Image (tube, coloured by chain):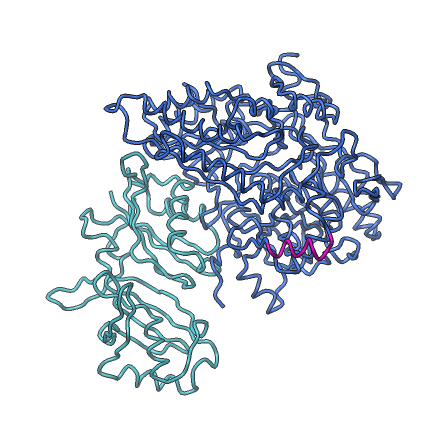
Amino acid sequence: MKARIKFRKYGALRFIGHLDVMRFFQKVMRRADIPIAFTGGYSPHMIMSFASPLGIGLSSDGEYFDIELREAVNSTDAVRRMNEACVEGIEVVSMKQIAEEKKMTGMTILAGADYLVSLKKGALPQDWKASFAAFMEQPEIRIVKQTKRSEKEVDIRPLIDRWEIRGEDIFLQLAAGSSQNLKPDLVMEAFCRYLDVSCDDAAFGYHRLEMYADAGEDGRRELVTLESLGWDME
Amino acid sequence: MKIEKPARYIGGEVNSVMKDKEKVDIRFAMCFPDVYEIGMSHLGIQILYDMFNRREDVWCERVYSPWTDLDKVMREENIPLFALESQDPVKEFDFLGITIQFEMCYTNILQILDLSGIPIYAADRTEESPIVIGGGPCAYNPEPLAAFFDIFYIGEGETAYDELLDAYKEWKASGGSRTEFLERAAQIEGLYVPMFYDAEYASDGTLKSFSPNNPHAPATVKKQVVTDVTDAPYPLAPVVPFIKATQDRVVLEIQRGCIRGCRFCQAGMIYRPTRERNVEKLKEYARAMLRNTGHEEISLSSLSSSDYSELKELVLFLIGEFKDKGINISLPSLRIDAFSLDVMSRVQDIRKSSLTFAPEAGSQRMRNVINKGLTEEDIIDGAGQAFEGGWSKVKLYFMLGLPTETEEDMKEIARLSDRVARRYYEIPKEERHGKCQITASSSFFVPKPFTPFQWASMCTAEEYMEKAAVVKKEFQEQLNRKSLKYNWHDERLTVLEGVMARGDRRVGRVIEEAYRLGCLFDSWTESFRSDLWMQAFENTGVDTAFYNLRERKEDELFPWDFIDIGVSRDFLYREWQRALAEEVTPNCRMQCSGCGAAKFGGGVCYEGKN
């Protein structure tokens, strides 16, 4: 039986890298006595897969991983037990049963993610809000994407599904997943270049809000949260 | 600002202890002066952290050495060193406790003091500074560090800390002076306050006299020992690091001390008498600790696990109880025999794992000198059984530069390794799995205080290199050289370690100078600066040869002689003479040799006598 766990990551724990978060949850499973299934072989490991690694320094309200259960658990009870086994900075939000099909794992179906970008005071010129709108009005936004072996120029504008100014923050809905993936820092980098200002890493804070699958048909994009694809276990 | 592994500094781990600082009387910063991943792997700190935090009036927090990247930032931006739990500056604490596990961390201790904003000399501290207290194996010769510490705790931490903390509370309430508190501390058994003692040197440089200059300080400081380790506090919910620590598992300390009496081994002498923990208690601990940490591995800790009398019972329990729950069971320091091979084959992948032997010396003559009760027959038979059981990788540990060592003894390291390989190739080709891999490593011997070899001379760095070259060459002449690999340690570190291990108060200036010149993380190859250390010796006029290159006379007063470890100096000297005569001394269970540790009233000295 498969289950999907949604969690938040905040505060100082945003400095814990992806691999360490995985190790953290493996230990949570043991401390909370969740009947997670193991692979076979000489060194069995827990069947657990994360939808999308979160970079070091980012906080999030919508992180996901899927696990295989040996037996059913009560969702409410399991969430409570996991939270008792967690620390300040990581909070389990929900645990839902999900479909058994292999192609339905969070990693495979991931299609989009929401981010909130906060700006350090004075990092950008005062009229940045208007500039950002103009920046987004461009027919294309070309950036140079570094890969391990080469660099190539890509247009990231189609990968930005939605955007809006929320108070002093910028909301971005970006393509995510194995086929198309855009990180919010690349958008901000491009914006800085557009403004012709130099920005160091510390100028922006990144917060992931949610992750989505594409439930649309006939090429029509319709994002639904990864959480909504599961159902509570009684 | 880019800091490697920021998780080293954030605290907040599972089982870390948070308290309200307004509601405690004493704030204790417990420090391991190395990077987080090393320090978090240390059992002793976990024991004390748990023990202190059980007291409602104490909040114990942890401090580790900031890596060189953060060190730089802290200096540039004047950020004071902070404890992990509260993130408060160490300077505001009542105590700074530093565990001193190896000699090559001494410059890191000065970094801790310096970054904390605490004067590095105890004499310069006022009532505003924390009390700086040191402990751990290197505290058995605290003299090179004497000027930097207010107090050293000699021995096992479980016994005298409560008394010290109570005394501190009383003193704090009374509003007395720092000296008054230290005078009170000096009267607690096991505590050494260096500033209350004077050292005088003779014209030949040796120690002439060492005596208290304060009426409250005793002439002899007695090592602290937990009589019954079963009743001692044990951390059932140790802190679980977010990032991978060197020791990322549940650790069960099954016993303290070692019955073997190897003459080079300091732990074998200072932790006497050998004391075992009750096996039923250990089973309870294993269950509780795995549940409380969520670790996927459990390991046994002791100097020689095979000598634990209930080993079989314990290991079979661990396998039976946890193997099916995906828990790895790790069994270090096991003697290779039929039982250990059987259990190892059940808990690890034979093809991938390697067997470890520590013959320490290549020839039987040399092994008699060091009293290593492992014969060539034991090694070849053990390896043979292992090879037949499917293993093909063997690690062998040796020491070079041991007292009385001849060229023949050195060459035997290569020849013994070859004989192990030959034993492998005796197995019919169709039954073995390809080639065997024998990896021999040698370290250079460093004489330690409170061992029979404390009188011995060391060699120069050049001589060490020559010795390694002799062994290397001999390896190339072996029949199975293609199955053999030989590594040796950095000889420059050995020389330094020698000076620190048996140094006196005059060495303190060298440590300070080395630190000022930029030495830090000396035990890390990438940051060890031998050139700066040599510069420090030159600048301070301290000669390494005085400490390393002379055999000491029978009656020479040693800097550490004011400490009473229970094992008598007479016994150690007797052992030194027996070593030179190549005579073996039986282990504690075979026959008591009257070392003196029986006066502690427990452990192996009284087995079968009740």
Residue extending farthest top: B609
Which residue ends up furthest to the right in the rendered image? B215
- Quadrant (top left, top right, bottom left, bottom right) of the C terminus of chain A: top left
| Spot occupied by residue B70 in the image (x, y as percentages of width and height) | 54, 61
- In the rendered image, which quarter is residue B297 located in? top left
Question: What letter labels the chain drawn in blue?
Answer: B
Compare residues B304 and B204 and report the one nearer the observer.
B204
Above-or-below relation of B209 to B436: below
Residue B205 relative to residue B260: left or right: right
Is B255 inside the magenta-drawn segment? no
Residue B555 showing in the rendered view: yes
- Whether residue A111 sits left or right of residue B323 in the image: it is left
Q: Which chain is cyan?
A: A
Camera-nearest residue between B37 and B209: B209
Residue B342 can be seen in this image: no
The structure residue drawn at horizontal position 46% and vertical position 76%, both measured from the top left corner, is: A120
Question: Is A45 on the left or on the right of B13, as rendered?
Answer: left
Which range of residues does the magenta coloring cover?
B531-541
| Residue B379 x/y as whole percent | 45, 22
* Rendering coords of residue B21 (x, y %): 65, 54
| Residue A24 vertical placement versus B475 (above, below) | below
Q: Residue drawn 65% across and 24% down?
A: B580
Q: Main secondary structure of the magenta part?
A: helix
Q: Is residue B533 magenta?
A: yes
